[in-house]
Every structure is written in C-alpha cells, then in structure tokens.
Amino acid sequence: MTVLGNQTGTAESSGSVPLPNPTDIGNPRPNPATESITFNTNFSASRACIEIYDLTGRIVWRSAITEPGTVQWNFGDIGKVSSGVYFAVIRSEEFSDSTRFVITR
C-alpha cells in the first residue's frame, strides 16, 4: 500500500490539461470519529472506490463510488474496528487520493 498523505490538488495528463480536484478527502468528518465518518466524493468517474486501511495495511472496509456526493462509513456496530489511526484511499482510473483519520471507541 502506498499512502499519499493529505494531498488534494490537480493532476496533469500527458496533454497538460489540468484535471479537476476530484475530492476533498483530506477533510473527513468528524475526525476523530466514534460511530461513523463521512468523505466527500465530488467527482464523476466510473469504477471508483474508497478503501479504509488500518496501520498494518489490512483493508477493513471497501465501497464502490457510483455518483458524486458523500460516502459514509458507519462502523459503530462493527466489532473488528478498534481505536486507532486509519487511512482512506479513493481510487479510479483517473486519480487517487488519500488521507488519515482517527477512530476513538
């Protein structure tokens, strides 16, 4: 797993055409989270997904992103998620972005 840090911005294609800033994933809310966390997904892309990783690199949650808006992860009743630092990664064929957040139980 490659973690990109708290990066948002523009990327350029081979034709030097700026791509739109696809997400505000660097600002998940609330952070720290206790029951759920929400990520902005303000872009249009086919075959995009969000993955949540723990510090060991294990994927603890994954979801497809089918339309712009927000993605909410409700983990309040999931026993396998403990307090700690987690990483969220949004990927599509056009971009990827990541951020870290904290869960407190």
Image (cartoon, rainbow, N blue to C red):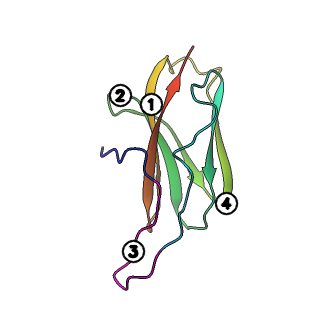
Q: Earlier in the sequence, mark 3 or mark 2?
A: 3
What residue do we see at 46% from left, 42% from top? Answer: 99
Q: Residue furthest top?
A: 105
The C terminus: image quadrant: top right
Disc 3 secondary structure class? loop
The answer to whether residue 13 is left or right of residue 73 is left
The answer to whether residue 61 is left or right of residue 34 is left
Q: Give the alpha-carbon distance from disc 3 to disc 4, as whole Å.
A: 21 Å
The answer to whether residue 3 is left or right of residue 93 is left
Q: According to the image, label 1 marks what residue?
A: 86
What residue do we see at 50% from left, 20% from top? Answer: 80
As shown in the figure, which amino acid type bears the numbered disc 2? Leu
As shown in the figure, which amino acid type bears the numbered disc 1? Tyr
Q: Nearer the viewer, mark 3 or mark 1?
A: 3
The N terminus: image quadrant: top left
- Residue 46, image x and y in percent? 55, 67
Q: Residue furthest bottom?
A: 15
Label of residue 12 in the image:
3
Do the residues under discs 3 and 2 have CB atoms within 8 angstroms? no
Label of residue 55 in the image:
2
**Is 25 within the magenta?**
no
Compared with residue 1, is residue 82 higher up or lower down, i.e. above or below? above
- Residue 39, image x and y in percent? 61, 44
What are the residue bounds of the magenta stretch?
A: 8-18
As shown in the figure, which amino acid type bears the numbered disc 4? Pro
Q: According to the image, label 4 marks what residue?
A: 68
- Residue 29, image x and y in percent? 63, 36
